[in-house]
Structure formats: C-alpha cells, structure tokens
Image (cartoon, rainbow, N blue to C red):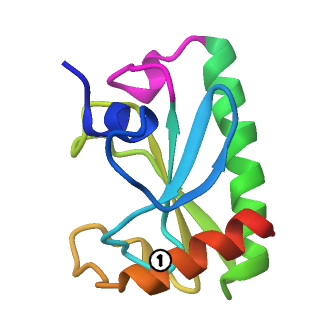
Amino acid sequence: MPTLFSKIIGGEIPCYKVHENEDFIAFLDIEPVAIGHTLVVPKVEVDYLFDLDEKYLTSINLFAKSVAQKLQKIVPCKRIGIAVIGLEVPHAHMHLVPLNQVGDINFSGGRLKLSHEDLTALAEKLRNA
C-alpha cells in the first residue's frame, strides 16, 4: 500500500517542494517544529532509513547536505539539525530543522501553523537558493 510520501512523490498529493533529483525529494513539513523544517525522502519505498542499501544511505546524506546548505542561506539559524524518527509515516525520511537553540528540534512540543502563502514563498526561495 502506498505511503503518504509515495503519494507526494507520485504527484497525487501536493507538497512545498524544495529540491528533487531522480532518487530523492525534499519538501517543507506542513506542521513544522521550526520555520524551514524540511523532510528529505527517498523515492524508493522503504520503511526504515537504516534499511536503505549503502548506495542510498550514502546518497541521501549527500542530498540532505545540499538541502541543508540551501536552508542555511535562507533561514536565519546557527545550524541545521537532523532527526531520524520514522514513526509517523512508514517511509524512510529525515527531518532537517533550522536551529538556534536545542529546543528548536523538540518534536513533542507544539507545531507551527504557517499559511499556504508563507510555505509557498519559503519553498520558492529555497528552490532558487
């Protein structure tokens, strides 16, 4: 059964795309823990990140690095944090979160509510970075 992320990859569900290549896609989280919170997802449907073969595991990190560099150019932050949780969607993915303090990557706290216009504008800035 296709996951939510598979439907996004297939274009069945829209997203705020930041970056894409033949193997991976990066898009903004619609309920971010911080402005710029981005999901990096392999296009291959695998449940757990560390079940990816070595080629994909290496490549997803290099892809995430390019996305993190875009985030740092556009979103004011000290660093880009990375989290691999994978419990919310059964499709391997990583969270890239702009950080100014440790609490910025708290997934059990409240989530931000950003408008469609704000997410669209941010995604466009990141794509053009």
Residue type (three-letter) at the residue carrying disc 1: Leu
Magenta stretch: give its range. Answer: 43-53
Q: Position of residue 56 (x, y in %)?
A: 63, 20
Q: Magenta stretch containing residue 12, yes or no?
A: no
Residue drawn at 37 percent across, 75 percent down: 33
Can you identify the residue that label 1 sits on? 119
Left or right for 71, reference 107: right
The answer to whether residue 58 is left or right of residue 38 is right
Give the quarter of the figure containing the N terminus: top left
Residue at the location (38% across, 79% down)? 116
Residue 103 visible at all: no
Give SS at disc 1: helix
| Residue that appears at 59% across and 78% down | 122
Above or below, 38 relative to 42: below
Residue 48 included in the magenta stretch of the image: yes
In the rendered view, tell whether residue 41 sits above or below residue 70. above
> How many marks on residues?
1
Above or below — where is 73 with respect to 17?
A: below
Q: Residue 89: image x %, image y %? A: 25, 40
Q: Residues within 10 Å of mark 1 (few under 14, many from 20)?
A: many
Q: Residue 77 appears at what percent x and percent y?
A: 66, 84
What x and y, as percent, mark residue 42?
Answer: 52, 30
In front of the other: 11 or 74? 11
**Looking at the picture, does residue 60 appear above or below residue 99?**
above
Q: Residue at x 42, y 32 (%)?
A: 10
Residue 73 sits in which quadrant? bottom right
- Answer yes or no: is residue 118 visible: yes
- Farthest top residue in view: 53
Magenta: main secondary structure: loop
117 or 94, which is in the foreground?
117
Quadrant the C terminus occupies: bottom right
